[in-house]
Image (tube, rainbow, N blue to C red):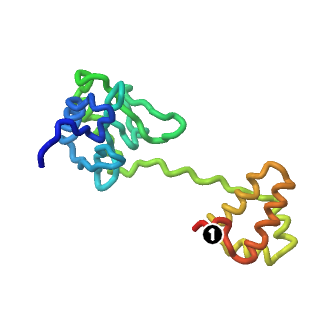
Amino acid sequence: MESNPDKKHVWDKVNNWEEELLFLKSIIEKTELVETIKWGAPIYVYNKRNVIGIGGFKNYFAIWFLNGVFLKDEKKKLINAQEDKTKSMRQWRFTSKDEVNEKDVLEYIKEAIENEKQGKVIAPSKKEAIISVLLNKEMELNPALKEAFEKFKPYKQYEFLEYIESAKQDKTKLSRIEKVIPMILANIGLNDKYR
């Protein structure tokens, strides 16, 4: 295959970190991680589980640790790129090849692999249970409705409750309850028509 010098690497968004990213790759190759391409970037996996990724951005190139929240980070290198969005991912940014200390980088990667082996992951947060006082009243008055509602799988019950309780005013909640009662009795889930 003929290489095209103009072809940009997908993982180097701005194409000005080629040498630096190849240097990072050469360090990662000393570990037991296997390179794959996901989301248009090199992601390194252990036992098919994503451990780290690398990429180039406008002002820096970085290694991101997909479960970086578990790293001890004794050298205080890691940052959370999106505070409110990412619970577990952490980034180590560099602005030049000289900043990459191979020994430190390998230490962090090996710790990340170790954490993966131990299965350290953040479980997705459980949805809060929703209670609808108005629907409960309705079900007390109508045992058939209660029985029909209980036949639904928990996620479908949740969808009904969320639909009712996301209304701000009681009168809206009541009109929504009126709308869903025939569906519940007919054993039709709130979002079935979209499924």
Q: Decide if residue 120 is on the left or right side of residue 44.
A: right
Q: Residue visible at 26% across and 29% down?
A: 17
Q: Residue visible at 45% across and 41% down?
A: 88
Q: Decide if residue 192 is on the left or right side of residue 180.
A: left
Q: Position of residue 76 (x, y in %)?
A: 38, 26
Comparing 74 with 123, the one in front is: 123
Q: Position of residue 30 (x, y in %)?
A: 18, 41
Q: Position of residue 6 (x, y in %)?
A: 21, 36
Can residue 12 be seen here? The reply is yes
Comparing 143 with 71, the one in front is: 143
Comparing 194 with 29, the one in front is: 194
Which residue type does callout 1 highlight?
A: Asp
Identify the image quadrant of residue 89. Answer: top left
Q: In the rendered image of this protein, does residue 96 appear above or below residue 84? A: above
Q: In the rendered image of this protein, does residue 91 appear above or below residue 177? A: above
Determine whether the residue tagged by mark 1 lies in a helix, strand or loop.
helix
Q: Position of residue 142 (x, y in %)?
A: 84, 74
Q: Residue visible at 81% across and 59% down?
A: 133
Residue identified by numbered label 1: 192
- Packing grade of label 1 (10 A; few <14, some 14-19, many >=20) is few
